[in-house]
Amino acid sequence: MKKIIILLFSIFPLFASCQNKEQTINYNGVSVQIPSDWGNKNTENHYEETDITEYQISCWAKDKTINTLAIQWIDTEVENDLYIETMIEMQQERFPMYKQLQFSEIVDTDFQNMQGKKCHFGKSFGYDDGFEGEYFSFTKNGYSYLVMISGDKKFYKSADYNKILNSIKPSFSGVVQSEEKKVQTSEISDNFTHYEFKEYSLSVPNSMELRGENSFMSLVKEITNDKIENIKKIDINDFNFVFQPLGCDDVMNIENQKKALALFARILISYQKGEKGDFMNWNDNILLTQSEYNELNKAFKSDLLSQSEQMKQVNIKLLNIENIKISKNSNKFVYIMQSYSRNGLNGDVKVTDYYLFNNSEMVKLTVSFRISESNLWEKDFEKILDTFSFNSKK
């Protein structure tokens, strides 16, 4: 059973403060009141091998505090002690900070008139506020719940802390409205998988995985972005779909995940819907005079250079910009390609943007990888463009 529970955890947020104004979060029958300026993300995972569904409400402060709340529940009953023990084990494996925490014994508790278990944890970390919190675990109506609330010592056991805990209403009804599937996949070769999205399709190397809304990387990104203040960010949220190296969300194999996270490669897709005639037709004439090409090339470079001013604020610098290329892919769809290189945390990065047009819609397809790892990605990434197709031709 312990192995099954470990499988269920993607991540509980690490960071997150409490103000007086409140907002109510309702998700699949569970509700909680949190400060109005906190961030929030609701997720769902279904694990076919165990036929267990996991639901989670994650909340965190957007300021510089470390206050956070997570409520997780699964559609099966497990021992309350085991639920808490498994969470502690998982977090200690994943996050070095949790190895430094002191955990109390797991003891009986009463959580809103329901018998359950709780465990206290904390550490000073050498500064006044420190870090302190609690796990609570209980069962209701055939579901197992785990609540984690934590933050600095000013928040711990404050009136706000207790108010949030007391506002949790675990009245899960068991009725879930499933969302329409956003993407369908099919294997087309040993090396590529074909992805069918609502408006378009393309094939992606099997060395990459589609990052889900409830993935480890997505949740950490959202919390981290909320912590960055006073800078204008290049926001990855502008992209509808993000592919990352296979294994980045492999919570069951920590070593495999570490290897994947050590690599850098991304495939980003952004879809824009416009009015009729806003963009080139799918098979438009791409022959330009030299002066027309020069003007368009200058416009693309100017736009990228203006973005570079924002990048500088997060220590990203453009190193080289190539001239644009205008052509058609194997499916005859018009595209404009722009490539450039930039610095990165662990080496320079090659980035290529493809703009594909279809009269009233446009897709920006971005592929990037660390130049020192080009042998892992470049050849396969060059093939992606020719697999792209809009679902209708306009």
Image (cartoon, rainbow, N blue to C red):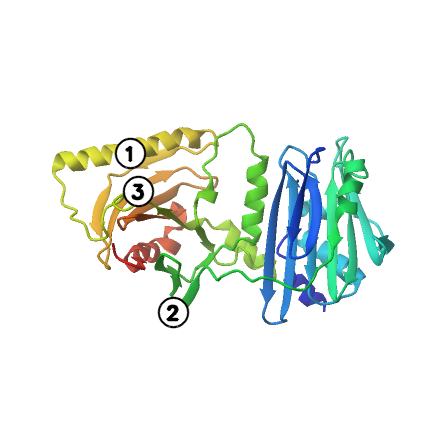
The amino acid at mark 3 is Ser
Task: Give 82 or 136, whichever is nearer the viewer.
Answer: 136
Q: Earlier in the sequence, mark 1 or mark 2?
A: 2
Task: Give 140 or 344, whichever is nearer the viewer.
Answer: 140
Relative to 199, residue 23 above or below: above
Relative to 187, residue 259 above or below: above
> Can I make out residue 180 in this image?
yes
Element type where label 1 sits in the image: helix
Which mark, by number, is residue 190? 2
For the residues marked 2 and 3, what is the alpha-carbon distance in whole angstroms?
28 Å
Q: Residues within 10 Å of mark 1 (few under 14, many from 20)?
A: some
Task: Give 281 or 298, whichever is nearer the viewer.
Answer: 281
- Where is mark 3, residue-wise? 339
Pinpoint residue 57: horizontal percent, then vertical percent: 65, 51
Q: Residue at x 40, y 28 (%)?
A: 309
> Can I make out residue 15 in this image?
no
Quarter that holds the N terminus: bottom right
Left or right: 83 as drawn, with respect to 9: right
